[in-house]
């Protein structure tokens, strides 16, 4: 694949914020693994960071390598990670509510159910 | 800005199902459960409620940051299908930049809230990493 020549706008509005996001997501992931006690709240942030990282890498790849836009994997990664990030916002709200409501809250099980539901929703909207 | 009624009819399914659907649905869910969580918090004892509220507020920041960054871009995508705003390169670029900054926004929230936790617990990042923060702020789900 050939690297595209970029205009100032593309650098300023696309490359710079995308690289910032990639660096920030990597920092968040490193922070997660450095903290000794991992909690569900932290895992929620980690999932968000991974999803945003996939989205940002896809955007960067499509800006640098224009031909990537015409590939099927571009649509798969771009839209699925975007929809997942959007729906994960609700996932966080649901998990917080459940933890407050249920005295016998089972975080791992609820976490797995929520992430599965969000993944399915993202895949469904991607399919539509 | 001229509204293209014909295009609107053509793209009405896209509008509801693909473009505006996810952020709107997610916003409704997030706001609904956030409101319910706030109501539940009122029943908690004051000592626990203060700390829990702090963590809930921070977690909700992540939710709303995601919707704030991706939502406008998708609304623009829809508008570009039904209205004459395709030529507005600046608006398109700014909204696109917002979505590209989503991960950065979350890292910023994480950084700021971690600083606030350290301040509340009168700890330095070094002592917190040694595990002191965990013992002081052991509230299972919200412990950061």
Image (cartoon, helix red, strand yellow):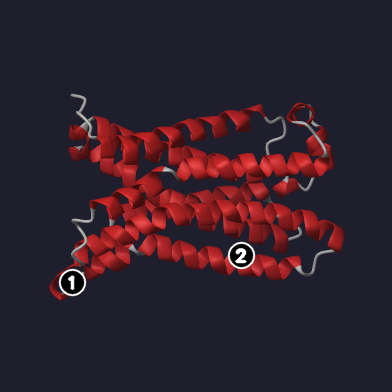
Q: Quadrant of the C terminus of chain B?
A: top right
Q: Quadrant of the N terminus of chain B?
A: bottom left
Mark 2 closeness class: few <14, some 14–19, many ≥20 residues within 10 Å: many
Question: If you read the primary sequence from the N terminus, does the residue marked by circle 2 or circle 1 appear first?
Answer: 1
Mark yes or no: residue A28 visible: yes
Task: Name the quadrant containing residue B130.
Answer: top right
**Position above or below: A28 against B36:** above
Location of residue A9 in the rendering, given as x and y in whole percent from the top left corner: 27, 40
Label 2 belongs to which residue? B34
Circle 2 marks a residue in which chain?
A: B
Location of residue A71 in the rendering, given as x and y in whole percent from the top left corner: 20, 37
Q: How many marks?
A: 2
Mark 1 closeness class: few <14, some 14–19, many ≥20 residues within 10 Å: few
Mark pair 2, 1: CA separation: 37 Å
Task: Name the quadrant containing residue B102.
Answer: top left
Q: Dot 2: what SS?
A: helix
Circle 1 marks a residue in which chain?
A: B
Residue in view at x 43 percent, y 52 percent: B69
**In the image as oriented, which residue stretches furthest toward the top?**
A2
Label 1 belongs to which residue? B2
């Amino acid at each position: 694949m050939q690297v595209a020549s970029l205009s100032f706008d593309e650098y300023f509005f696309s490359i710079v914020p995308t690289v910032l996001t990639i660096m920030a997501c990597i920092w968040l992931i490193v922070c997660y693994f450095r903290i000794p006690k991992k909690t569900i709240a932290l895992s929620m942030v980690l999932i968000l960071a991974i999803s945003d990282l996939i989205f940002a890498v896809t955007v960067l790849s499509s800006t640098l390598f224009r031909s990537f836009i015409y590939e099927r994997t571009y649509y798969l990664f771009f839209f699925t990670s975007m929809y997942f990030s959007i729906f994960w916002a609700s996932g966080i709200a649901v998990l917080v509510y459940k933890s407050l409501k249920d005295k016998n809250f089972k975080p791992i099980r609820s976490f797995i159910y929520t992430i599965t539901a969000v993944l399915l929703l993202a895949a469904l909207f991607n399919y539509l | 800005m001229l509204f293209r009624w014909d295009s609107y009819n053509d793209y009405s399914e896209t509008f509801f199902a693909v473009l505006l659907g996810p952020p709107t649905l997610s916003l409704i869910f997030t706001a609904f459960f956030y409101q319910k969580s706030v109501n539940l918090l009122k029943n908690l004892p004051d000592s626990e409620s203060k700390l829990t509220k702090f963590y809930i507020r921070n977690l909700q920041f992540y939710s709303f940051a995601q919707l704030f960054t991706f939502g406008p871009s998708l609304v623009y995508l829809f508008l570009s299908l039904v209205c004459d705003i395709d030529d507005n390169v600046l608006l398109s670029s700014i909204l696109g930049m917002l979505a590209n900054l989503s991960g950065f926004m979350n890292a910023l929230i994480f950084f700021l809230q971690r600083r606030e936790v350290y301040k509340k617990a009168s700890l330095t990042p070094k002592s917190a990493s040694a595990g002191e923060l965990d013992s002081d702020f052991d509230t299972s789900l919200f412990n950061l």
